[in-house]
Image (cartoon, helix red, strand yellow):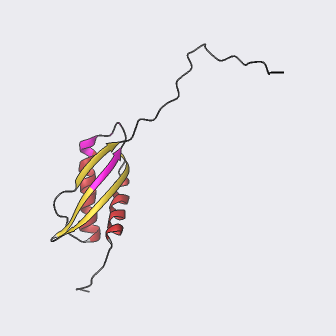
């Protein structure tokens, strides 16, 4: 069938991109912001990565996944490359280890 049209809201497109990008191994959170342009869609991404993430690798993968999602799965042209803003999650704090041999002795109950 030719000439069929589908209508998707910007929120639905944002959500689809966020699902795809967040599935990448080093991405903890993502936020997409899609803007309609004359010849397609422009996308801005905000990514939250772990402290040890490989930024160039993740940025390239996020842009690739975004382009595939927009062009192949949604069927609309992507205008330019996505703009990507990176933030890092704080490192997880580990409890301070008790120095060996220094264990707290139990106190007698108060009477």
Vertical arrangement, residue 57 with respect to residue 67, above or below: above
- Relative to 19, 55 lies left or right: left
The quarter of the picture where residue 63 lies is bottom left
Give how far across and how far down residue 29 sits, in percent. Answer: 38, 51
Q: Which residue occupies 40% across, 37% down?
A: 90
Q: Is residue 51 magenta?
A: yes
Q: Which residue occupies 30% across, 52% down?
A: 46
- Quadrant location, the N terminus: bottom left
Give how far across and how far down residue 8 sits, in percent. Answer: 32, 74
Most distant residue in the front direction: 111
Vertical arrangement, residue 7 with respect to residue 92, above or below: below
Q: Which residue occupies 57% across, 20% down?
A: 98
What range of the chain is rendered magenta?
Answer: 45-57
Vertical arrangement, residue 23 with respect to residue 109, above or below: below
Count of number-bearing discs:
0
Give how far across and how far down residue 74 sits, in percent. Answer: 28, 70
Give how far across and how far down residue 33 sits, in percent. Answer: 29, 60
Q: Which residue occupies 47% across, 32% down?
A: 93
Vertical arrangement, residue 50 with respect to residue 84, above or below: above
- Quadrant location, the C terminus: top right
Q: Is residue 90 magenta?
A: no
Most distant residue in the right direction: 111
């Amino acid at each position: 069938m030719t000439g069929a049209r589908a209508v998707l809201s910007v929120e639905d497109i944002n959500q689809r991109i966020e699902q795809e990008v967040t599935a990448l191994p080093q991405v903890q959170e993502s936020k997409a912001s899609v803007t309609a342009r004359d010849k397609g869609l422009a996308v801005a991404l905000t990514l939250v990565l772990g402290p040890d993430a490989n930024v160039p690798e993740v940025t390239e993968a996020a842009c690739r996944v975004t382009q595939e999602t927009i062009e192949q799965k949604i069927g609309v042209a992507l205008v330019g490359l996505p703009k990507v803003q990176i933030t890092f999650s704080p490192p997880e704090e580990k409890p301070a280890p008790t120095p060996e041999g220094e264990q707290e002795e139990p106190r007698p109950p108060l009477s």
